[in-house]
Image (cartoon, rainbow, N blue to C red):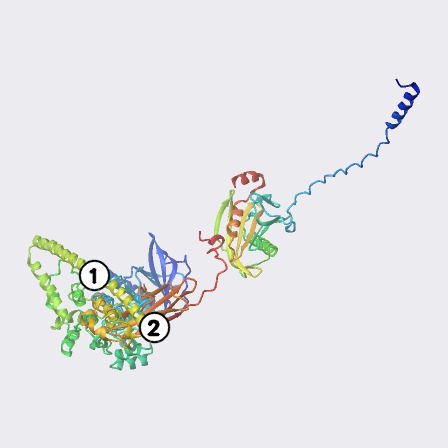
Amino acid sequence: MIPRPLALVSLLVSLGACAPKTPPPPPPAAPIAVEEPPPPPPKCEALEEGCVAKAGQRATVHPIEWTVAPPAGWKYAAEPSEVVALTDTAALAISTFESSADKKPAAVKAKKAKRDEAIARLAEKLGIARPKKLAFPAKPHQASKVHGIDVALYQFDGAKRGDEPGPMLVFVAQLVPDRALLGLAFVAEHDTTNADAAVLAAIDSLAPAADEDGAAAAQ
Amino acid sequence: MTELRFPPGRIIGGRFTIQAELGRGPGSVTYRAITAPNREVAVRVFDPAVPNATGLVQVLHEAHARSGTDLGRFLTAIVDSGRDDESGAPFVVVPLVMTPSLAQLVALCPFEPADAAAMIVSLGRSIDALHAAGLAHLDLKPTNVFVGPAPDRSVQLTDAGLHLLHGGAPGEWAAPEQVGTPGTAGPAADVFSMALVAFHALTGATLLPSARVDERRAALASPTLVADRVRQLGITLPPGLDAVLARGLAVAPAERPPSAGAFAMALSSALSGAHPVEPAITEASLAPAITEAPPAPAITEPAPPLVEPEPVPSASAGMLTLPVPPPPPFALPVPPPPSALLAPEPVPSALLAPAASVEAVSLEAPLSSSSFATEATEKTARRARPTAFLPREWRSRSLVLAAGGGAFVLFLVAGGLALARFGASRSEARSAEGALASASAHEAAAAPIAEAPAPAAAPPVEEPTAVQAPSDPIVAPSEPVAAPNEAAAAPSEAPTLQLGPKKGELLVVCEPVPCHLVMLDGKPMREYPNPAVVRAGVHGIGASRSGHGGQWQQVVVPERERKTVVFKLTPSAPTAAKKPCGKFLRRCD
């Protein structure tokens, strides 16, 4: 039997030995990763954005709100007044110009002037040196119907983009009574990527924005 | 000359839509055109500046129409004519000929003698038919002669009489009388042109050195014109041919053979190596034929042959038995000279052969008793006479029998010819193998000749000639075939090769790399790279190798000598990438 004082002392010693230590400072909280919002997808409204068209991707031609599927793999941009798509050996631009359905000579003359002005603008945009003489025949070289709209296609030889010669394609379609769609395309003669076929496929993909889904499904 | 250029799509005469330009000559342009119902034709548009061109076109059209449809076998007759409203240019429409022209064929390769003989006989028959119909061609030249396939080489002529609408001077194929006083030339001028055309077909070259009148006159005055030119070209012609050609090239029309058919037969005989059968042309026989032209009993006899005569190789006979259209130049009145329609120009009288001269040409054959033409005429008459006296039903039966018999004979002849050609091609193949063997022997003999046993090496040298001889029926009969032993004795390196007459050796060498394909006269040269035994004369040789492009040369192989032709091939510029044949709307696929 342990005497009472000794027991008390041992109790005290044991108590002192088991006294709780000062708790360590809590570890610094791990920095919580702040999830930044993903960068907004490029609007593809300028060629500098470097957007590359994927299959089925569509771009809107303003202000008529028609859309076109730029050739897959081409660098493209839906700029405010035109859709532009480029490769090293080919280029495509689609825009609109004021065009009245009036058949009077003066109106027709004005329409042609607007068209030529738009062609000049697109050619400059794409870096295409047009043929010296751009004589549009009375009858287009080819006419096709795209989404219920008659598209007139004209082909001109003797164009150049940089030092590369090649044919130039112009296509025109009267979409609404006061506005016509105008497209300009160029493919270098030495192109081996079938870029001209891709351009023709893009023209076939033209559709009103409202029917975009349908057009995409059709592709 | 007024510029005549009609773009595709332009409509002429309200019904002929221009498709493409076929050719352009002095004063005229020929277009391929289409007309309803989807029929392709050739439209020849003339310079409206030619005086009275529209009237001439009309006269020509009427003359062609009057000559009847039977002439269509020989002549692409004018089927339509008119005047273009917009440009005022007169035009004539002829059927589109699908066979190549003589000029195109000769540009590829001159004719072999056998082919040339067949072509010339057909040409003579065509010209005779033309003359019998009251037309003179007067613009005979290689571009106006369209030649069918072998072995017939049947000829179709174009542009008969159209020379007056060209508005230019007579060309290099014209007879002297066409140059001097236009309007006086008649059928004899066609004979003259025919001689030039025949020479061109055989040699690929023109006989007269220049188109200048004075130079032509000087050349024609030379009695050795043909021989000199042949020597200049370094070729040989069958013996006797130059004499026949010289007869056709006589400056005076009266000294030429009396008809194109007779001339053709003489040429054909000379080409076949036989003694040329020339119609006896003497002052006595010719003069009455031209001045009087008495009716020959065989022709005036009212017994037209009931069976359409088979094409006899005698052109004169063909001329006489040709179904002459309703206004024949013999019995019925000659159509009024077109000069009456086209006053005041005397041109159409030259355009259509003068009636007297047509009669003379047609009737003089029976007058020359020694000519083959007379014999053929008499044979034809003998064939025709018995049937003429038979009752009608007997006549029709004899007609059927004769037709059947004729068909059977034709069948036999055709079968025999086919067998002969088959045998000849086999012989040719064997000779080619022989040539290969001889070439190997030659190469081996570059080593000491003594090492190559002469009897073993030499026979292949001679074998091609010996075997090839039957394949060349024109040359074969007169060719002495060397015996193999004689050839064996000859050294293989001798400068003069032991070959038959009119034969030479051709060796094609491609440097620095061998050729993939060598063409000899339009056919693959099977002997390449070994020498080939060929006919001495002018040959066209093409050589090509993939990646190196192709080259072509025309060479003259001398008789009994070896001609070596070297093609230096250069690699073609590498193409970066194969590009499609068109873009956008002009894609090929």
Q: Residues within 10 Å of mark 2 (few under 14, many from 20)?
A: some
Mark drawn on residue B423: 1
Secondary structure beneath disc 1? helix
Q: Chain for mark 2?
A: B
Q: Position of residue B125 (x, y in %)?
A: 21, 66
What distance separates the C-alpha of mark 1 from that of mark 2?
30 Å
State which quadrant residue B364 falls in: bottom left
Residue A96 horizontal side relative to residue B221, left or right: right
Give residue B32's position: percent from left, percent from top: 36, 59
Alpha-carbon neighbours of circle 1 within 10 Å: few (<14), some, or many (≥20)?
Answer: some
Apparent side of residue A11 relative to residue B454 in the rendered image (left or right): right
The relative height of residue B375 versus residue A212 in the rendered view (above or below) is below
B6 lies above or below B282: above
Residue type at mark 2? Answer: Thr
Residue B346 visible in image: no
Percent of width and height locating residue B550: 40, 65
Front residue of B353 and B467: B467
Say whether disc 1 or disc 2 marks the residue closer to the N-terminus: 1
- Are both tags, 1 and 2, on one chain? yes
Picture quadrant of residue B341: bottom left
On-image quarter of the N terminus of chain B = bottom left
Query: Where does residue A187 sit, x and y in percent of width and height?
Result: 53, 55
Determine the chain carrying the residue at label 1.
B
The residue most toward the right is A5
Task: From the image, tell me which residue sits under label 2.
Answer: B564
Question: In the rendered structure, which amino acid carries the disc numbered 1?
Answer: Gly
Q: Which mark is residue B568?
A: none
Q: Secondary structure at mark 2?
A: strand
Residue B132 falls in which quadrant of the image?
A: bottom left
Q: Is residue B264 left or right of residue B7?
A: left
Residue A151 in sight from this viewpoint: yes
